[in-house]
Image (tube, rainbow, N blue to C red):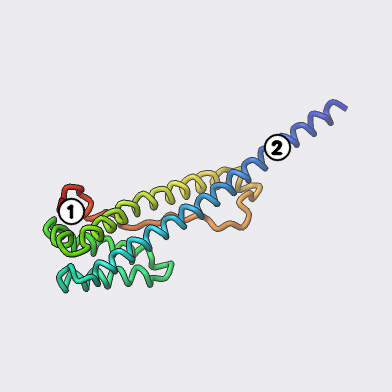
Amino acid sequence: MSTLIWAAVALALIGVYLSWTAGRLDRLHARIDAARAALDAQLLRRTSVAQELATAGVLDPAASMVLYQAAHAARQAEEEHREVAESELSQALRAVFAEPGQVVAVREAPGGDAAADELAAAVRRVPMARRFHNDSVRAARALREHRTVRWFRLAGHAPFPLAFEMDDEPPEALTDRTAGH
């Protein structure tokens, strides 16, 4: 009789552990979804501010065209091409704002100070949002690689989480707090 009780206790403990692990995995997947939504919002904000700045007439025509085309491509990109389009927007931002003088010119235009501050904030937040998303993905992947999770199929039918890899290096002249002030 005591063997039966110990077996029942062992099965109950295993069940609790499996349930706890499945719940943890579910919470990680929810965290990935929330982090991806935050990343998407920051990328959209950066794209919108870049497009506004490109059409505001404060940049020279060539810089405006480069920035507008890159921002438009990032906004219209299909999901499988989005990382490349967002990287190209980062590269366009660095090319347009390679010189601190360009930031000064933008700030001197009417409404330019607010636009430059908004763009600087947007380009600073994208790497943070991407890092938070990728950290969540890394944690979920690590848990999904555990033998117990694989054997008992605790991940269910959830897709394998993918990191968002892009060039998110901000333009130095734009993020330097002393530039143009």
- Residue positioned 43% across, 67% down in the render: 79
- Residue positioned 33% across, 65% down in the render: 47
Rate crowding at label 1 as few (under 14), some (14 to 19) or many (20 or more) other CA atoms within 10 Å. many
Q: Is residue 36 above or below residue 10?
A: below
Q: Is residue 174 above or below residue 18?
A: below
Residue 76 is marked as: none
Amino acid type, residue under disc 1 in the picture: Ala
Give the percent coordinates (x, y) of residue 165: 37, 56
Q: Quadrant of the N terminus?
A: top right
Check if mark 2's residue and mark 1's residue have beta carbons within 8 Å.
no
Amino acid type, residue under disc 2 in the picture: Ile
- Whichever of callouts 2 and 1 sits on the residue coming sooner in the sequence is 2
Q: Secondary structure at mark 1?
A: helix
Give the percent coordinates (x, y) of residue 145: 54, 46
CA–CA distance in space, label 2 to label 1:
56 Å
Residue nearest the observer in this picture, 160 or 54: 54
* Residue pointed to by mark 1: 173
Q: Which of label 2 and label 1 is nearer to you?
A: 1
- Residue positioned 15% across, 50% down in the render: 181
Give the percent coordinates (x, y) of residue 123: 29, 55
Residue nearest the observer in this picture, 89 or 118: 118
Q: Quadrant of residue 110?
A: bottom left
Residue 14 is marked as: 2
Q: Secondary structure at mark 2?
A: helix
Q: Is residue 127 above or below residue 115?
A: above
Q: Looking at this rendering, what residue extends furthest in the left direction?
A: 101
Q: Looking at this rendering, what residue extends furthest in the top direction?
A: 2
Relative to residue 52, is residue 95 drawn left or right?
left
Q: How many marks?
A: 2
Relative to residue 119, is residue 157 drawn left or right?
right
